[in-house]
Amino acid sequence: MAKKLFIQTYGCQMNVHDSARMADVLAPLGYAPAGAAADADLIILNTCHIREKAAEKVYSQLGRLKKLKDGRDGRGPLIAVAGCVAQAEGDEILARAPYVDLVVGPQTYHRLPELLRAADIRPHVVDTEFPAESKFDILPPPQSRGVSAFLTVQEGCDKFCAFCVVPFTRGAEESRSAEAVLGEARALVDGGAREITLLGQNVNAYRGHADGLAGLIRALARIDGLARIRYTTSHPRDMTDALVAVHGEVDKLMPFLHLPVQSGSDAVLARMNRRHTADDYRRIVARLRAARPDMALSSDFIVGHPGESDADFAGTLALVEEIGFAQAYSFKYSPRPGTPAATAGDRVAEPVKAERLARLQALINSQQFAYNRGFVGRTVPVLFDRAGQRPGQVAGRSPHMQAVYVDAEGAGLLGRIVPVLVTGGHANSLNGRLDPGSPARNGAGRPAAGTSAA
């Protein structure tokens, strides 16, 4: 009888991809997906350590899983903690939750089969080393999982932002070879993928191609059957002229970019060790929009970083007002152990952080709603990749990363790029109807010269 595996994923798209790869690693051992933790023989929490709240969610979930462990007359599931909390707090996890069987870091999950064998012999196996071998040289070929696929091209970070644990949990920047990436991309396309999102902690620091990420994108665009290319997450310091130019020259590269700025204040950016200014960011955005006028932008913001004054926060609001974002993610500063900012003085009081976050999110939400509402009456090419939220509904993504919902039961839309006339714009999605009179020429939906996506 097949064993059952349940993976609960926290955090970024990299973790979503890692969870899928862990399932690939465990499939030869007979593990099939479980619909719920209660049905599983092995439960893996794939964790995020970027904020304190995310880490505490993991410990809360472990407390709930203990009941499953205790409630099967000694035959409870194996419990594993993977990902960045595992890397940062390996032994602390076992101290706080001694019923956990296995702790495995994000660079060693390719060793899961041997670690599970070790867990059968002795309790409390921990593997949070940075191995000499690359996991990408050992992982099995990826299994196709549908129309849209993630493909890791770069891991780790050398930027050492003062607030961030990623360099300590994911290690130094490492790029996969272009040959390996292109081979995996072809396999994904052969398996049905029409869209590939390239992943990396600093994906635009990719160095596995002679021409960097720009060269890799050009090579990917030559793959027959691949209609759309995206990449995330980027750092402003690595937004090269060549990469900007690709946005204007490769139709398969979608006009949407997640480019975190974190703050609109130069003083705060310096404290964060971001090594760019607010004006640097403005110039990058101007270059991107010159290359691709319909470019939609997303970003990350931290409010209440140590030393942030009212004037500093006003600078962030001014930057958001000026740039205009299709979407963005914003958070209160959360001290992470081992980072320089965690020991900095001049802390911002929690009520002040909360008030600033509410103001920033209100502004971002108004921009996002206005951006989506501006698509009403326009026809956009939608790549349909999943069932919708209610019977008879199909969902997909626009080139600008908007979720689009259409009532089209039995139309055979999955995997196709189809023109949709937008009839409704909402805070987080669009509604529309099929518009066969306006065929999509390609996956990009590039507007005619002189038109704007905003």
Image (cartoon, grey):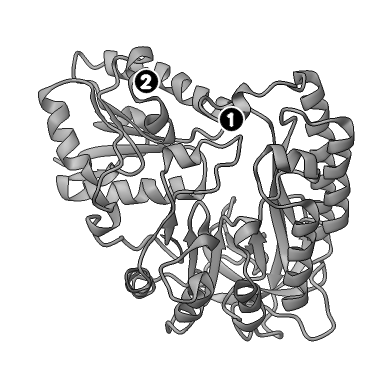
Q: Amino acid at mark 1?
A: Pro
Q: Nearer the viewer, residue 211 or 319?
A: 211
What mark, if any, has residue 213 been given in the picture? none
User: Which residue appears at 46% of the width and 84% of the height?
Assistant: 222
Identify residue for label 1: 340
Whether residue 63 is visible here, answered yes or no, is yes
List x then y, in percent, for residue 294: 76, 72
Q: Is residue 238 left or right of residue 269?
A: left
- Amino acid of disc 2: Ile
Q: Is residue 207 left or right of 454 when viewed as pictured?
A: left
Element on which disc 2 rests: helix
Quadrant assignment for the C terminus: bottom right
Using the rendered image of the protein, determine whether residue 40 is visible from the camera's viewpoint. Answer: no
Mark 2: few/some/many CA within 10 Å (<14, 14-19, 20+): many
168 and 247: which is toward the camera: 168
* Residue 351, above or below 167: above
Asked whether 105 or 238 is in front, the reply is 238
In the image, what residue occupies the spot 70% across and 37% down? 271
Q: Quadrant of residue 340?
A: top right
Which residue lies at the image location 32% right of the left edge and 69% below the top edge?
180
Percent of width and height locating residue 392: 57, 59
In the image, what residue occupies the spot 24% across and 48% down? 132
The image shows residue 408 at horizontal and vertical percentages of 60, 67
Q: Is residue 438 above or below residue 164?
A: below
Q: Nearer the viewer, mark 2 or mark 1?
A: 1
Work out whether mark 2 precedes mark 1 in sequence or the reverse, and give the earlier one: 2
Residue 333 percent across, percent down from the top left: 68, 30
Q: Is residue 61 left or right of residue 296?
A: left
Residue topped by disc 2: 93
